[in-house]
Image: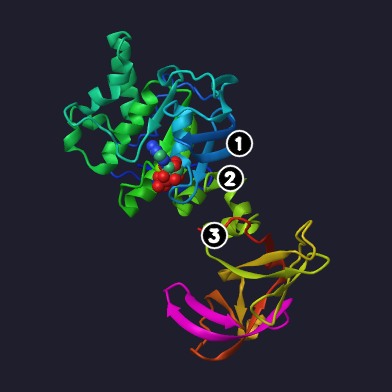
């Protein structure tokens, strides 16, 4: 594995330069002290109530030892509640949680938080200002021999690139450095599981992006099983092999980000991950042609929606999959539209086209001359039309 002063992400070869300019925390990585401590996690039909109100309605997911799983969803969907329940800060009102095959929480029995071997990293870094970086990190190691505390603290500070800052106080650190202290503190006690609750959302955009890769690299190095919570779809998509998409206390879809993007199972999943145009209507008897309710158009898809013949459904069409003008000719779906609005966004034109009563957002990359009000052909391949059932629960 090649490294310079940056963080090397094996999967997609992205090199990121660390914010501190400190020695590369990945090269010369101290490995002897950092055996993998990841345990499996199984969450089964978990329910959580606050007072009489259920915030999490029976969700299930699991992670293999050393795995990284992201809970993604809008504000209030139950992400933090789920984490708090795994950590032992909230009792379940139904279901169970297992770590390494051992049940740590059911309605009737809960292992105390300090006995679970689980650490949590929050959005607010919670770094103690009156303690040095080294003290902040070593605090959790109280009770073990001094030499070992010193060695383990040094190894972890090296790993997160903070060795030079060991004697600084919490107040003398930047946001990114404070977040690294929080990471170091979460790792040093060698937990079986780390829970991250929007750990990067207090950082500015550039640093947030950089820290994503740094955090992932660290997670892979240490091998600790991790649950990562975010409401930011870009963060979820760039960091995770697997995303659990939550909405109003339910799981909408659990899959690889690419699959959720290409084959969303619900209208919510289609809209939450990337912008989706939704054309509502009714499917034919074969489930592969949709007659739109608000426009005189039919949308044909390559794949039928199983079990939905004759049912209300929505066709999902991504903005980058719609072709205009000459490019629309000969495609499986060609509709007559009118250009409503054109915005120049640098890399592409963001075009609003209306087909009958249906507004469609289109990304145009080929410099087509477009004028507002102009009539235009709108084309989509059948392979780029995907049907989902109409939402049963009201949209938020
Ligand atoms: N202590 C509490 N008492 C009562 N209701 C609560 C409590 N904590 C959370 N809730 C409610 O439970 C639901 C889920 O909240 P939760 O904090 O898990 O959402 P979240 O997905 O983490 O949202 P955010 O992205 O805003 O952090 C919300 O409706 C919230 O109002
Ligand atoms: Mg939250």
Separation of marks 1 and 3 at Cα, in angstroms = 23 Å
Local SS, label 2 = strand
Q: Which residue is mark 2?
A: 251
Local SS, label 1 = strand
Separation of marks 1 and 2 at Cα, in angstroms = 8 Å
Q: Are marks 1 and 2 in contact (CB under 8 Å)?
A: yes
Q: Residue at x 29, y 37 (%)?
A: 125
Whether residue 188 sits left or right of residue 296 in the image: it is left
Start-end of magenta stretch = 329-355
Separation of marks 3 and 2 at Cα, in angstroms = 15 Å
Crowd rating for badge 1 (residues with CA inside 10 Å; few <14, some 14–19, many 20+)? some
Q: Which residue is mark 3?
A: 395
Q: Which residue is mark 1?
A: 60
Q: Are marks 1 and 3 in contact (CB under 8 Å)?
A: no
Q: Quadrant of residue 29?
A: top left
**Does 344 appear above or below 184?**
below
Q: Position of residue 154 (x, y in %)?
A: 30, 22
Q: Residue at x 44, y 47 (%)?
A: 76
Q: Nearer the viewer, residue 333 or 151?
A: 333
Mark 1 or 2, nearer chain start: 1
Mark 3 or 2, nearer chain start: 2
Q: Position of residue 223 (x, y in %)?
A: 49, 28
Query: Which circle, 3 or 2, is nearer the viewer?
Result: 3
Disc 3 under 8 Å from ligand 1? The reply is no
């Amino acid at each position: 594995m090649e490294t310079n002063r940056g963080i090397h992400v094996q999967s997609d070869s992205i090199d990121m330069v660390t914010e501190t300019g400190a020695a590369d925390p990945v090269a010369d990585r101290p490995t002897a002290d950092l055996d993998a401590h990841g345990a499996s996690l199984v969450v089964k039909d978990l329910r959580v109530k606050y007072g009489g109100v259920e915030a999490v309605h029976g969700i299930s997911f699991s992670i293999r030892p050393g795995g990284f799983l992201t809970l993604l969803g809008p504000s209030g969907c139950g992400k933090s509640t789920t984490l708090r329940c795994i950590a032992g800060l909230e009792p379940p009102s139904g279901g169970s949680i297992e770590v390494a095959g051992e049940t740590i929480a059911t309605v009737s029995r809960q292992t105390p938080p300090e006995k679970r071997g689980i650490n949590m990293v929050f959005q607010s870094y919670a770094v103690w200002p009156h303690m040095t970086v080294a003290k902040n990190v070593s605090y959790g190691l109280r009770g073990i021999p001094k030499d070992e505390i010193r060695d383990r603290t040094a190894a972890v500070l090296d790993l997160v690139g903070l060795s030079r800052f060991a004697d600084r106080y919490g107040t003398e650190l930047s946001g990114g450095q404070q977040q690294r202290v929080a990471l170091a503190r979460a790792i040093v006690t060698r937990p079986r599981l780390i829970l991250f609750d929007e750990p990067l959302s207090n950082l500015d955009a550039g640093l947030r992006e950089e820290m994503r890769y740094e955090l992932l690299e660290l997670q892979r190095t240490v091998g600790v099983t991790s649950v990562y919570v975010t409401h930011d779809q870009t963060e979820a998509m760039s960091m995770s092999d697997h995303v659990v998409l939550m909405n109003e206390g339910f799981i909408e879809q659990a899959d690889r980000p690419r699959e959720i993007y290409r084959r969303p199972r619900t209208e919510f999943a289609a809209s939450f991950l990337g912008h989706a145009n939704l054309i509502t209507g009714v499917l034919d008897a074969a489930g592969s042609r949709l007659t739109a309710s608000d426009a005189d158009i039919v949308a044909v898809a390559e794949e039928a929606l199983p079990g939905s013949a004759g049912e209300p459904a929505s066709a999902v069409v991504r903005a980058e999959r719609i072709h205009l003008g000459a490019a629309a000719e000969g495609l499986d779906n060609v509709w007559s539209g009118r250009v409503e609005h054109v915005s120049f966004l640098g890399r592409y034109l963001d075009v609003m086209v209306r087909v009958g009563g249906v507004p469609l957002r289109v990304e145009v990359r080929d410099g087509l001359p477009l004028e507002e009000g102009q009539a235009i052909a709108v084309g989509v391949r059948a392979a780029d039309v995907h049907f989902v059932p109409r939402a049963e629960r009201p949209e938020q």
